Amino acid sequence: MPNDISVNHIVRSFQTPYDAFISRFESQLGRHDISAYSNLLGDNHRAKDAEAVLHRQEGASGLMLFSVYDHGALLSIKGSPRKARQYVVGNPLFAARMTQHDIRAALYAPLRVLVYADDSGATRVEYDLPSSLFAQFKNAKVNAVAAELDRKLSDLVEQSSST
């Protein structure tokens, strides 16, 4: 049965050069490496150890990079490459804080962010506002974490645009 939801889509535009923006964006993200803690999962006696590993993987933003996909390079198969990257970012500790209350929140964690140079040369950033994605679960504890993610993403984008 379909469940219609309303999602707030954020679009920000900056005069910061694309390469400078993504350099700052990526420098604020930690790097997620599941191999560093996967052997600790499932053992309740090692939960704190797994959390400690995850905290060490956090970047200055409190978020981690799961993957980056160069969509702009993909367009070279159509003869018109662009500057555009899709980032998958998040933090498993935030995901666990939400999914312990509603496992369906796992569908939206981690998050996606698109950074690209538009036709005018401006750097644009687009993402779906986490609180609007997670609101469909109607859970105050999930919503509180999602609001934290709203702030973290907004801060990450703002700090990446600064010169």
Image (cartoon, rainbow, N blue to C red):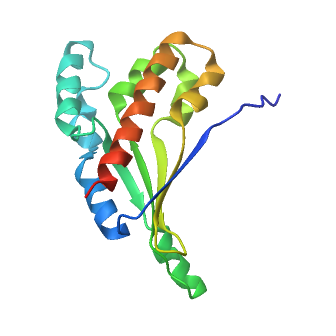
Q: Nearer the viewer, residue 103 or 44?
A: 103
Q: Who's the residue at 37% across and 68% down the image?
A: 18
Q: Position of residue 131 (x, y in %)?
A: 54, 28
Q: Who's the residue at 55% across and 75% down the image?
A: 119
> Is the residue 17 above or below the residue 137 in the image?
below
Q: Is residue 136 left or right of residue 126?
A: right
Q: Position of residue 51 (x, y in %)?
A: 23, 24
Q: Quadrant of residue 128?
A: top right
Q: Position of residue 17 (x, y in %)?
A: 35, 69
Q: Nearer the viewer, residue 38 or 60?
A: 60
Q: Nearer the viewer, residue 46 or 30?
A: 30
> Is the residue 94 above or below the residue 17 in the image?
above
Q: Position of residue 87 (x, y in %)?
A: 42, 54
Q: Who's the residue at 63% across and 15% down the image?
A: 138
Q: Who's the residue at 38% across and 48% down the image?
A: 157
Pick out the residue farthest to the bottom: 79
> Is the residue 155 above or below the residue 23 in the image?
above
How many marks are shown on the rendered structure? Answer: 0
Pick out the residue farthest to the right: 1
Quarter that holds the C terminus:
bottom left
Quarter that holds the N terminus:
top right
Q: Quadrant of residue 62?
A: top left
